[in-house]
Amino acid sequence: MQELIIFLIFAVAIVYLSNRAYQSFSAKKAGCGKGCGCATDTRASVRAAEK
């Protein structure tokens, strides 16, 4: 029974780490990833600051 619990904890940890790795290597949308709408293009940021 103890081995089953340890295996389940290990399996959950592997799934969690795999998901985190997949998200970090997958294509990202423009911005900083926080959902604030900031631009990654510095020219766009400069133009917005000039307005």
Image (spheres, grey):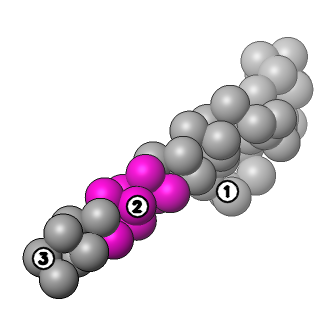
Residue 16 seen in render: yes
Residue type at mark 3: give it.
Gln
Q: Is residue 24 above or below residue 15?
A: above
* Crowding at mark 2 (Cα within 10 Å: few <14, some 14-19, many 20+): few
> Residue at label 1?
36
| Relative to 8, 46 lies left or right | right
Instruction: Point out the frontmost of discs 1 and 2.
Output: 2
Label 1, label 3: how many angstroms apart (C-alpha)? 45 Å
Identified by mark 1, the residue type is Cys
- Find residue 6 and report its horizontal and vertical position in percent: 20, 67
- Residue at the spot of label 3: 2
Q: Quadrant of the N terminus?
A: bottom left
Q: Which residues are magenta?
A: 8-16
Whether pointer 1 and pointer 3 mark residues with C-beta atoms closer than 8 Å, the reply is no
Q: Is residue 33 above or below residue 7?
A: above
Most foreground residue, 47 or 44: 44
Viewport quadrant of the C terminus: top right
Report x, y in % for residue 23. 65, 45
The disc placed on residue 11 is: 2
Q: Residue at x 31, y 58 (%)?
A: 10
Q: Quadrant of residue 11?
A: bottom left
- Amino acid type of the residue that numbered disc 2 sits on in the rendered structure: Ala
Q: Earlier in the sequence, mark 1 or mark 3?
A: 3
Of badges 1 and 3, nearer the viewer stands 3
Q: Nearer the viewer, residue 35 or 7?
A: 7
Q: CA distance from mark 1 to mark 2?
A: 34 Å
Q: Nearer the viewer, mark 3 or mark 2?
A: 3
Q: Residues within 10 Å of mark 1 (few under 14, many from 20)?
A: few
